[in-house]
Amino acid sequence: MTSVEDVYPPGHGTPEDPAGSDARRQTSSGDDRPGTTADPREVWESVIDVFEQAADEPKVAEPIGRIGHDVLIRSLDVEGSGLLLVCRDARIEVRDVDGASADYTIEIALATPDLEKLAAGRSRTAMAIADGRATYDGPVRQFLRVLPLVQAMVNPPDAMGTNAEDIAQEIV
């Protein structure tokens, strides 16, 4: 094991490139075709839409609003992006930061492929942080515990008894 490739498998980064160049080539379909990334601004707008929907959905907003923090979400690929979630009194207030300084207790910054997954309800934000694809500041675990509620709103899990095998048997 003398070469860098032996120590750092493809896609897992090196000291010079912590996220790995493969992480930047993911597309909305999750494949690794070079040069086919989604438009960062469109992805950012879809993330904003998801959190605005979450603020309007009481079953999602109430538990998130109980964490009692102001959460700044930023895109690493869209300069000046910033979405402030004021999570207080069992509700979420969504504010556009527009690159200005804001008071927040938790900050999460994600690259476009991870934001795209977040907007689709398939994000593993804790893994993005662990892999070095995302940055954070503050008590992020409190927000990561309730973030799956937003994802379940966008991408609901299968209800018990409604998996594909049960549906196929009902049709037959």
Image: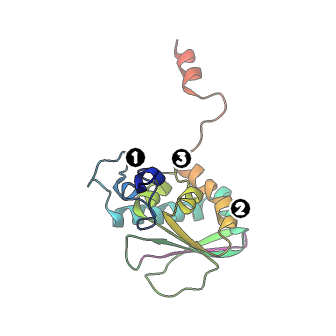
- Residue 155 - label: 3
The answer to which of marks 3 and 1 sits earlier in the sequence is 1
Q: From the viewer's perspective, is 69 left or right of 73?
A: right
CA neighbours of label 3 inside 10 A, class few (<14), some (14 to 19), many (20+): some
* Residue found at the very far front of the displayed protein: 2
Amino acid on which disc 3 is placed: Asn
Q: From the viewer's perspective, is 154 left or right of 29?
A: right
Residue under the point 70% across and 63% down = 62
Q: Dot 1 lies on which element?
A: loop
**How far is mark 2 from mark 3, CA to CA?**
18 Å
Q: Which of 103 and 131 is in front in this view?
A: 131
Question: Which of the 4 image quadrants contains residue 102?
Answer: bottom right
Residue 66: percent from left, percent from top: 73, 68
**Where are the magenta residues, as a range?**
81-90
The answer to which of marks 2 and 3 sits earlier in the sequence is 2
Residue under the point 56% across and 15% down = 169
The answer to which of marks 2 and 1 sits earlier in the sequence is 1
Q: Does the magenta stretch include residue 83?
A: yes
Residue named by callout 2: 63
Q: Nearer the viewer, residue 92 or 119?
A: 119
Amino acid on which disc 1 is placed: Gly
* Residue found at the very far bottom of the displayed protein: 101
Residue 45: percent from left, percent from top: 40, 65
Residue named by callout 1: 30
CA neighbours of label 2 inside 10 A, class few (<14), some (14 to 19), many (20+): some
**How far is mark 2 from mark 1, CA to CA?**
30 Å
For the stretch drawn in magenta, the main secondary structure is strand
Residue 20: percent from left, percent from top: 41, 59
